[in-house]
Image (cartoon, grey):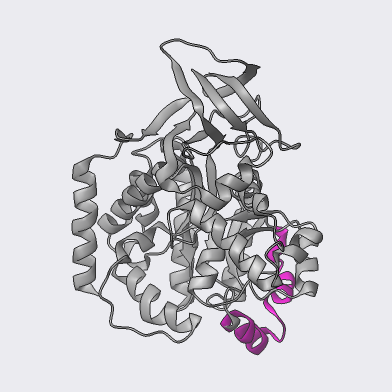
């Protein structure tokens, strides 16, 4: 296929923005980017639109979708109460059907919003074994790229955590090969909901399988307080003592990491999935991403399952960091687009495949109609971050194939699927 682009935001190393070009994709790979437009039956025409790389969501929880609108009679006053009063009730009520259908509904929304690659951490202890495969079945209805894991937790018992670790092991070594564009990884919920034994077990398997471990790190202060109580030191130092950083680590959140801890993360090449909208919604604080980048950490961005519109997540990042600095010019909005593309791709270890529009990479694109205002190369990144939303996405392309087009729906997801998603959500509400 070939794609005409009025404005092409490449997100390559030099942040090139090109005008009036066409991209040639063969066997899913970008082979040429040339001046001028072309015509033909296999041409995707965005000659009057803006084309950016397919967005990459570096941290999400698709199992949160069924809870939207749920009439939960709770009033959490802390992050920990959010977990105990809402999320741990939800994940323990999940069925295999919920696991699959929440993935179907979430993937549909991501593709409509221009997300072509994502990393998900599923939690449903009563769906083990096999819950992660149910998630993969839902994801695989579409061509989206995914990294999937089960979120292991010893909050009830070490045995339950081991079942979660086993679930990831089984998927990676026995099931993953059955799916295209889906890879497994390992995930621990937090340090405070795990033990030294479960940490070490996860590290051993992740190193053996050459897979990353994702961990919620210091999202709330409970993680810090429990680490000091149980291990005598803050989470990063406790994890370091356990050999956690012998593995390839993706840290989500990092809200309360100190500069000293950030230095340890940098020394161990840890990457961070920043979740600004979620951190605001949970009132946990604002991660010190400025110091993290200064120390050399790679930053990506995720929605943490809260809002499928990644443009809103980008805008949340801009807003909270300006507010933190008390300066309307205190954060470069274009940085948020970097985090949502090549930054997140690098966090996931996929920077050689996705995250930018360059020869040799996969043909993943998000096409945007930004409205009647002129679009200028020097300001287009700011325009996208400050003004775009999922409703401006007219096409989403993966491997050179249009998988979402405005008015035509998402490849692989039917109206019957969406009705089933809604019915399953209502049944879940009744169980809660």
Query: How many numbered tags mark residues here?
Result: 0
Between 286 and 316, the one lying in front of the other is 316
| Secondary structure, magenta segment, majority class | helix
Q: Residue at x 60, y 76 (%)?
A: 285
Q: Is residue 201 visible?
A: no
Residue 417: x and y in percent read: 23, 45
Between 223 and 335, the one lying in front of the other is 335
Q: Which residues are magenta?
A: 222-246
Q: Residue at x 44, y 10 (%)?
A: 40
Q: Is residue 407 visible?
A: yes
Left/right placement of residue 277 relative to residue 179 reads right
Left/right placement of residue 252 relative to residue 239 reads left
Determine the image quadrant of residue 249. bottom right
Between 188 and 11, the one lying in front of the other is 11
Which residue is outermost to the front?
373
Q: Is residue 305 above or below residue 231?
A: above
Q: Is residue 254 above or below residue 82?
A: above
Residue 415: x and y in percent read: 21, 42
Q: Residue at x 48, y 84 (%)?
A: 78
**Quadrant housing the C terminus:** bottom left
Residue 37: x and y in percent read: 55, 15
Between 427 and 235, the one lying in front of the other is 427
Q: Is residue 294 above or below residue 73?
A: above
115 in magenta: no
């Amino acid at each position: 296929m070939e794609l005409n682009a009025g404005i092409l935001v490449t997100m390559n190393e030099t942040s090139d923005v090109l005008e009036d070009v066409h991209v040639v994709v063969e066997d899913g790979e970008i082979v040429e980017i040339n001046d001028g437009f072309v015509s033909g039956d296999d041409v995707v025409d965005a000659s009057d639109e803006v084309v950016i790389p397919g967005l990459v969501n570096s941290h999400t929880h698709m199992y949160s979708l069924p809870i939207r609108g749920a009439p939960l009679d709770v009033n959490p006053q802390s992050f920990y109460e959010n977990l105990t009063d809402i999320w741990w009730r939800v994940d323990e009520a999940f069925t295999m059907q919920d696991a699959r259908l929440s993935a179907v509904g979430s993937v549909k929304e991501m593709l409509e919003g221009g997300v072509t690659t994502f990393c998900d951490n599923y939690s449903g202890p009563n769906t083990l074994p096999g819950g992660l495969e149910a998630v993969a079945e839902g994801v695989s209805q579409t061509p989206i790229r995914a990294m999937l894991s089960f979120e292991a937790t010893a909050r009830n018992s070490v045995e339950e955590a081991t079942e979660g670790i086993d679930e990831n092991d089984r998927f990676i070594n026995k099931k993953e090969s059955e799916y295209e564009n889906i890879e497994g990884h390992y995930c621990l919920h937090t340090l405070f909901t795990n033990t030294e034994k479960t940490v070490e077990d996860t590290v051993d398997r992740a190193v053996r399988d050459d897979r990353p471990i994702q961990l919620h790190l210091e999202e709330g202060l409970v993680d810090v307080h429990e680490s000091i109580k149980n291990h005598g030191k803050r989470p990063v130092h406790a994890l370091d003592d356990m050999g956690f950083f012998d593995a390839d680590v993706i840290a989500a959140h990092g809200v309360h990491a100190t500069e000293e801890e950030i230095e340890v993360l940098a020394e161990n090449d840890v990457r961070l999935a920043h979740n600004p909208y979620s951190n605001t919604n949970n009132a946990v604080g604002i991660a010190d991403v400025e110091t993290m980048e200064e120390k050399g950490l790679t930053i990506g961005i995720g929605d943490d399952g809260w809002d499928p519109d990644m443009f809103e997540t980008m805008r949340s990042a801009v807003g909270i960091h300006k507010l933190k600095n008390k300066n309307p010019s205190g954060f470069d909005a274009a940085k948020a687009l970097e985090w949502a593309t090549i930054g997140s791709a690098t966090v996931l270890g996929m920077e050689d495949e996705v995250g930018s529009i360059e020869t040799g990479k996969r043909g993943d694109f998000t096409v945007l109609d930004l409205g009647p205002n002129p679009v200028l190369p020097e300001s287009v990144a700011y325009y996208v971050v400050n003004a775009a939303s999922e409703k401006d996405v007219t096409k989403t392309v993966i491997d050179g194939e249009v998988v979402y087009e405005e008015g035509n729906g998402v490849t692989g997801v039917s109206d019957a699927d969406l009705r089933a998603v809604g019915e399953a959500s209502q049944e879940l509400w009744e169980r809660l």
